[in-house]
């Protein structure tokens, strides 16, 4: 029994790290205080690749630490986020389509204007200029490499 309790006490040491995330409404204030590059992660609830990717990225402590220290991260659920978003001086709204829909901002950020590919990663520099765009699965190794390149700019 003691061994089991000791094991349970050690579990948090092996648990996943957490990437700190914010919202689009938090960004404007945060950027004024401390300009940093922005990572926008578009995903959906139904996307199995998104879930696999999230688990893999959260397991990589170096990537999580890099994101938390040098970037602002906004996780954006493209089909469930319904509030109006003001981003880069423009207003974007949810576009309902029967029982589902998509946010205008997801369409604006995606190169595929008919239907974004999920997951979608967009990285903007501290001046909000696009520096990286990636559709589909992002591995921790690729993420780390790209973010190190961007943070060195």
Image (cartoon, helix red, strand yellow):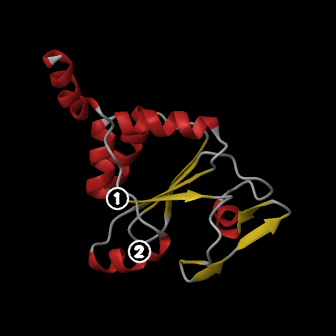
For marks 1 and 2, the one nearer the N-term is 2
Q: Image quarter for residue 103?
A: bottom right
13 or 40, which is in the foreground? 13
Q: Write the residue at 74% across / 54% down.
A: 112
What secondary structure is found at the residue carrying circle 1?
loop
Q: Image quarter for residue 107?
A: bottom right
What secondary structure is found at the residue carrying circle 2?
helix
Asked if residue 152 shows in the view, the reply is no
90 or 4, which is in the foreground? 4
Quarter containing the C terminus? bottom left
For label 2, the crowd category at 10 Å Cα-Cα, with few meaning under 14, some 14 to 19 and many 20 or more, is few
* Pointer 2 residue: 26
105 or 81, which is in the foreground? 81
Rendered location of residue 20, percent (x, y): 35, 56
Residue at the far right: name it. Answer: 98
Q: Write the residue at 32% across / 71% down.
A: 35
Rendered location of residue 14, percent (x, y): 26, 29
Task: Give above or below for 139 relative to 123.
Answer: above
Rendered location of residue 58, percent (x, y): 38, 39
Task: Give above or below for 54 relative to 129.
Answer: above
Q: Image quarter for residue 98?
A: bottom right
Q: CA distance from mark 1 to mark 2?
A: 13 Å
* Pointer 1 residue: 71
Q: Write the residue at 13% across / 18% down.
A: 2
Asked if residue 11 shows in the view, the reply is yes
Rendered location of residue 15, percent (x, y): 30, 34
Marks 2 and 1: in contact by CB < 8 Å?
A: no
For label 1, the crowd category at 10 Å Cα-Cα, with few meaning under 14, some 14 to 19 and many 20 or more, is many
């Amino acid at each position: 029994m003691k061994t089991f309790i000791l094991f349970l006490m050690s579990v948090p040491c092996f648990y996943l790290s957490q990437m700190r995330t914010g919202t689009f409404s938090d960004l404007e204030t945060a950027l004024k205080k401390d300009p940093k590059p922005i990572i926008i992660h578009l995903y959906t609830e139904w996307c199995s690749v998104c879930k696999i990717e999230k688990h893999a990225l959260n397991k990589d402590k170096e990537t999580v630490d890099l994101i938390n220290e040098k970037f602002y991260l906004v996780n954006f659920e493209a089909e469930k986020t319904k509030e109006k978003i003001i981003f880069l001086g423009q207003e974007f709204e949810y576009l309902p389509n029967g029982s589902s829909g998509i946010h205008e901002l997801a369409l604006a950020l995606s190169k595929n204007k008919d239907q974004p590919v999920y997951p979608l990663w967009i990285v903007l520099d501290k001046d909000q200029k696009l520096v990286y765009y990636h559709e589909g699965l992002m591995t921790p190794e690729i993420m780390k490499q790209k973010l190190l390149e961007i943070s060195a700019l």
